[in-house]
Image: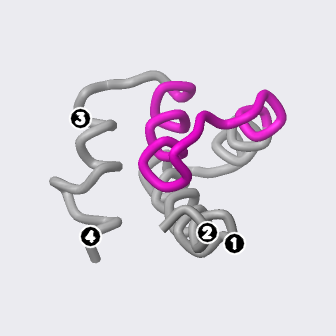
């Protein structure tokens, strides 16, 4: 899928060695056209710390954002 592709958004952000905050911010901006709130950043940080694979975690986050009601209203 495009979400898991090496040259997809998550792959490029990980290749660029972006910080956790930057990756989450970029995923929110790309999908919801806004930055994540402090609560959302904290939830994402907690989700990442519980995940054995950062790549899979960010892919799951991107899927969640793409399937959110907010995404439907933005796009």
* Relative side of 69 to 33, left or right: right
Q: Tell me which label, 4 or 1, sits earlier in the chain.
A: 4
Q: Quadrant of residue 24?
A: top right
Mark 2 vs mark 4, CA separation in Å: 22 Å
Q: Which residue is mark 3?
A: 15
- Verify CB contact (< 8 Å) between mark 1 and mark 2: yes
Dominant secondary structure of the residues highlighted in magenta in the image: helix
Q: Nearer the viewer, mark 4 or mark 1?
A: 1
Say how the picture is coloured. one colour
Residue 69: numbered disc: 1
- Verify CB contact (< 8 Å) between mark 3 and mark 4: no
| Magenta segment boundaries in residue numbering | 20-42
**Looking at the picture, how far across and down is residue 48, in whole percent?**
64, 43
The image shows a total of numbered marks equal to 4
Mark 2 vs mark 3, CA separation in Å: 30 Å
Q: Which residue is mark 4?
A: 2
Crowd tier of the residue under label 1, counting other residues whose Cα lies within 10 Å: few below 14, some 14–19, many 20 or above: few
Is residue 70 found inside the magenta-colored segment of the image? no
Crowd tier of the residue under label 4, counting other residues whose Cα lies within 10 Å: few below 14, some 14–19, many 20 or above: few
């Amino acid at each position: 899928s495009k979400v898991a592709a090496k040259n997809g958004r998550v792959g490029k952000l990980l290749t660029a060695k972006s910080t956790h905050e930057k990756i989450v911010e970029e995923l929110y901006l790309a999908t919801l056209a806004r930055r994540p709130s402090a609560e959302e950043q904290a939830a994402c940080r907690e989700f990442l710390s519980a995940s054995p694979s950062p790549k899979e975690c960010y892919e799951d986050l991107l899927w969640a954002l793409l399937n959110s009601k907010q995404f439907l209203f933005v796009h």
